[in-house]
């Protein structure tokens, strides 16, 4: 009797789950796509507006080199202390 009740409970749970998923998928709608971005920059719709990135790369490279140098300095300092 317990096995029949377990099977009935599992079957009922699965059926309810499938009906719920099916009804949710029918009632959901996709959103409209966003409007296109306004054109900017002198050369049309260029991502970023044609902003120069050269100086930003130099700053990023300098900060990375400084961070690497500090890590090497700390590693050597700890190695000598041991």
Image (cartoon, grey):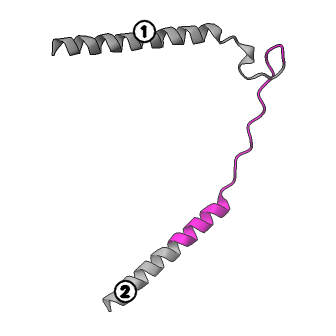
Labelled disc at residue 66: 1
- Give SS at disc 1: helix
Q: Is residue 59 left or right of residue 70?
A: right
Residue at x 65% of width, y 12% of height: 53
| Nearer to the camera, 49 or 37 | 49
Rounded to the nearest angstrom, the CA distance separating label 1 from label 2 is 69 Å
Percent from the top left, x then y, of residue 68?
A: 40, 14
Q: Residues within 10 Å of mark 1 (few under 14, many from 20)?
A: few
Quadrant assignment, res 26: bottom right
Quadrant of the rendering where the N terminus is positioned: bottom left
* Mark nearer the N terminus (1 vs 2): 2
Does the CB distance between marks 1 and 2 fall below 8 Å?
no
Quadrant assignment, res 81: top left
- 29 over 44 or under it: above or below: below
Residue, disc 2 = 5
- Give SS at disc 2: helix
Percent from the top left, x then y, of residue 65?
A: 45, 11
Magenta stretch, residue numbers = 17-43
């Amino acid at each position: 009797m317990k096995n029949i009740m377990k099977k009935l409970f599992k079957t009922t749970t699965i059926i309810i789950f499938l009906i719920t998923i099916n009804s949710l998928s029918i009632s959901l709608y996709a959103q409209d796509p966003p409007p296109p971005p306004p054109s900017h920059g002198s050369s049309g719709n260029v991502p970023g507006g044609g902003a120069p990135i050269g100086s930003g790369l130099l700053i990023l490279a300098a900060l990375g080199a400084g961070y690497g140098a500090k890590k090497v300095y700390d590693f050597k300092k700890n190695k000598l202390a041991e």
